[in-house]
Image (cartoon, rainbow, N blue to C red):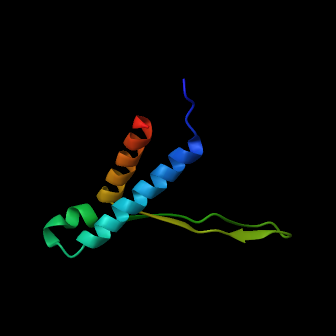
C-alpha cells in the first residue's frame, strides 16, 4: 500500500484555496453570484512581552464559498491520486 505524503496534501490544499480565491476574484463583478464571492476574514493576533523577548504576530485568512470549494476539490484530487 502506498503511503501518502502530508506535505503534498498541504500543497494541494493551498493551491485549491488559491484557485478558488482567484475564481471568486474574477466573479466579483457579477452581482448575481455575490453570495459565492463574499469573503469572511479570520484573524489571529498572538502577542507577548516577556521582558527579554517580545513578539507580535498577525495571521489573516480570507475564506469564501468558492475558496472552500477549491479546498474540497483539492482534497478530492489528492485522495484520487
Residue 59: x, y in percent?
A: 56, 65
The residue positioned farthest toward the top in the image shown: 1
Residue 45 to residue 2: above or below: below
- Residue 49 lies left or right of residue 17; in this view the side is right
Residue 73 to residue 30: above or below: above
Q: Quarter holding the C terminus?
A: top left
Q: Image point 59% across, 66% down: which residue? A: 45
Number of residue marks: 0
- Residue 81 lies left or right of residue 70; in this view the side is right
Q: Quarter holding the N terminus?
A: top right
The answer to whether residue 4 of the structure is visible from this angle is yes
Residue 71: x, y in percent?
A: 39, 50
Q: Image point 58% across, 46% down: which residue? A: 7
Q: Image point 72% across, 69% down: which residue? A: 55
**Within the image, what quadrant is residue 30 found in?**
bottom left
Residue 64 to residue 51: above or below: above
Residue 17: x, y in percent?
A: 41, 57
Residue 73: x, y in percent?
A: 35, 47
The residue positioned farthest toward the left in the image shown: 32
For the residue pair 33 and 10, the one nearer the viewer reads as 10
The residue positioned farthest toward the right in the image shown: 52
For the residue pair 36 and 13, the one nearer the viewer reads as 13
**Within the image, what quadrant is residue 5 found in?**
top right
For the residue pair 43 and 48, the one nearer the viewer reads as 43
Q: Image point 36% across, 64% down: which residue? A: 21
Amino acid at each position: 500500500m502506498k503511503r501518502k505524503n502530508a506535505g503534498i496534501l498541504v500543497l494541494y490544499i493551498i493551491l485549491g484555496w488559491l484557485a478558488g480565491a482567484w475564481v471568486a476574484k474574477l466573479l466579483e463583478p457579477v452581482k448575481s453570484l455575490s453570495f459565492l464571492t463574499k469573503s469572511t476574514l479570520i484573524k489571529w493576533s498572538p502577542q507577548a512581552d516577556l521582558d527579554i523577548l517580545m513578539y507580535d504576530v498577525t495571521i489573516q485568512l480570507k475564506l469564501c464559498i468558492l475558496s472552500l470549494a477549491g479546498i474540497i476539490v483539492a482534497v478530492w484530487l489528492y485522495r484520487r491520486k
